[in-house]
Amino acid sequence: MGLITLGIPIQPNSISYMSKKLAAKLPIIGWREWISLPDLGVSTIKVKVDTGARSSSLHVFGLEAFEKEGKPWVRFEVHPKQRSDENAVSAEAEVLEYRSVRSSSGKSSVRPVILTHAAMMGNAWPIEVTLARRDEMGFRMLLGREAFRGRFLIDSGNSYYGGRPLRKKKSL
């Protein structure tokens, strides 16, 4: 007899409640990956794939709210490279809503939520992203489970299944 979790029978050696046929078709990603945010002009940004976080979060600078044609918008900068302000990207996006989000430290804050596209491994899809200052965090972006549910399987012990961007050689 299999286990029952949340009222769903789980068979031994099964992949959670997902069918083996569906799971076999999904690409695998690691706990760290490189993605692009083409709508925002971000060609590469390293993300932490966070199965414990429901929503995705992007570290932004200079967040400014404004109205455009009677709708709420935000203007901000993204610094895609960790621990660097090189190659800053300026972006604007319409605000879907303002959402109360609880951080990993347990502190709640209200953040703007935007809709943008994420792209990796030849796939692009829309994701909701909260915008926040993530100064104390190691990654400029968290990719929460709503962004990858039903699209990828996560290998929590490995990284960069989608490859790494080419590094520029330092000139002497």
Image (cartoon, rainbow, N blue to C red):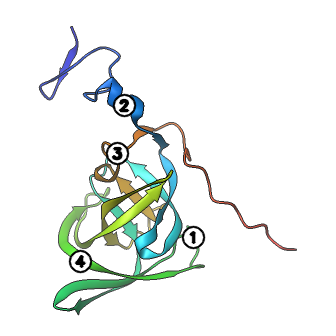
Q: Amino acid at mark 3?
A: Thr
Q: Which mark is residue 95?
A: 4
Q: Which mark is residue 51?
A: 3
- 3 vs 2, front mark: 2
- 1 vs 4, front mark: 4
Q: Name which of mark 3 and mark 4 comes first in the sequence.
A: 3
Across and down, in percent, residue 30 comes to 49, 43
Q: Name which of mark 1 and mark 2 comes first in the sequence.
A: 2
Q: Amino acid at mark 1?
A: Arg
- As measured in the structure, the alpha-carbon distance from the residue carrying label 3 to the one carrying label 4 is 24 Å
- As measured in the structure, the alpha-carbon distance from the residue carrying label 2 to the one carrying label 4 is 34 Å
- As measured in the structure, the alpha-carbon distance from the residue carrying label 1 to the one carrying label 3 is 24 Å
**Circle 2 sits on which residue?**
23
User: At 62% across and 54% down in the image, what residue appears?
Assistant: 164
Residue 63 picture quarter: bottom left
Tell which residue pokes out farthest to the top in this image. 1
Instruction: Tell me the element at label 2.
Output: helix
User: Mark 4: few, some, or many residues within 10 Å (few <14, many ≥20)?
Assistant: some
- Residue 14 is left or right of residue 108, and the answer is right
- 1 vs 2, front mark: 2
**Circle 1 sits on which residue?**
83
